Amino acid sequence: MEEMRVLLFSGKGGVGKTSVAAATGVRLAEMGRRVLVMSVDPAHSLSDSFDLGPDLFQGQTADPYPVAERLWIQEVNIQKEIRRHWQAISSYVVSVLRTTGLSDVEAEELAILPGMEELSAMMYVNQYRREERFDVVILDCAPTAESMRFVSMPTTLDWYMKHVFPFQRTLIKAVRPIANRVSPVELPTDSYFANVKDLFDRLEGVGELLENPRATSVRLVTNPEKMVLRETQRAFVYFSLHGLTVDWVIANRVLPEEVNDAYFTQWRRSQREALEEMESYFAPVKVKRVRLFDQEVLGRRRLQALAEALYAPGEDPAEPASLERPYSFQKVDGRYEVRLRLPFASKGEIGLFKKGDELVVEIGALRRHIGLPTSMAALTPTRARLENSLLTVEMREVV
């Protein structure tokens, strides 16, 4: 059996990301794949997208819920996840919070720590991969900032488990009998650490899964608007920084040609400018355009219509459009480098200049815009070399 594919849809809140993810699930299920669409956004709207009615809001979708043949949805329910996976950790946090004078209800609310939902979703992805339960898992992620936290967690947890966890567990075990006599709060029990270790074991391998372009593709959903585009550009940079491959950018709600009322003239002009900037900035990643529908996309029939607008006949949404990140960032011997794959470029005069927090590279008629992470945004390009179709640009601080 082929390896399970993971399609991660991210974007600014309100751009239509959930509808695009759901429509992709509908198309893949119709093509014969076993598909799960999972919502990682705390403000779930996935069941709304399928127009399933209010009864499902009582947590029925906390487990895979069938909505069509070969198609399931799942909305991660943090209260159920705490009971299933986080009990020892949550109980300890609640006991600490109670000592501050908070009521039981307030303590239980505050004991929902940032990242619990994202980690729970990762555990499910890993579980379904091991069980070979689905052919494709589609992740409808929270707005962009939370998505960044989602993809950075495997690296952060791996470092914690290797460098902090063993020392912390050993130290607390040694001092607990004495400390508990004098401390107003009891130190974590062995079950707390066992819970942490169990959770980490369930996540083993998920980092490699996310960074493997044959297994995971990121699709950024945006609108042709300047404010939305800026956040999409930042997301593109940070997914690249964390080693994930963005293979499509989806420009949703583009005014269709038949809308020619004078009222929309300026709106159409601004959309056209934003789309031109998208094409330039994200190249060679393909920008797909999806027209604005004349009604809200709710229910399977309208999701099918959205899928038809998004995907060409016979196109496989699960197929990776690219197996290579457009660029990567490195730090070598104290200097920063941007590495850019240019398979069709030939050696010649290379033009480099900064434009805000972007690095612009020109080789002949070819131009690439590269968004820079915060740590490199203040640096200046000083040298570039092209070897075996790989352009390496050195970035330095110019005093």
Image: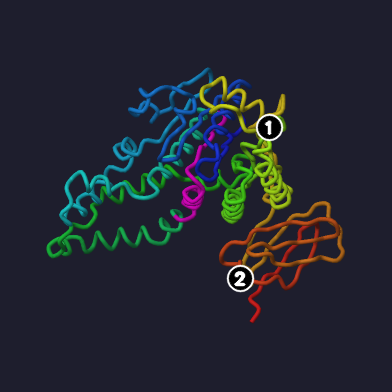
- Residue 161 lies, in percent from the top left, at 41, 55
- Residue 297 lies, in percent from the top left, at 54, 27
Q: Nearer the viewer, residue 391 or 202?
A: 391
Query: For this view, does 62 lie left or right of residue 386?
Result: left
Q: Is residue 361 above or below residue 257?
A: below
The answer to whether residue 167 is magenta is no
Q: Residue at x 28, y 63 (%)?
A: 171
As shown in the figure, which amino acid type bears the numbered disc 1? Answer: Val
The outermost residue toward the front is: 262
Q: Nearer the viewer, residue 258 or 55?
A: 258
The answer to whether residue 151 is magenta is yes
Q: Residues within 10 Å of mark 2 (few under 14, many from 20)?
A: some
Q: Does residue 218 appear anywhere in the picture?
A: no
Which residue is tagged 2? 378
Sequence-first disc among 2 and 1: 1
* Magenta-drawn segment: 135-156
Q: Residues within 10 Å of mark 1 (few under 14, many from 20)?
A: few
Q: Secondary structure at mark 2?
A: loop
As shown in the figure, which amino acid type bears the numbered disc 2? Answer: Ala
Q: Secondary structure at mark 1?
A: loop
Query: For this view, does 24 lie left or right of residue 273?
Result: left
Distance of label 2 from label 1 (alpha carbons): 43 Å
Which residue is tagged 1? 259
Res. 59 image quadrant: top left
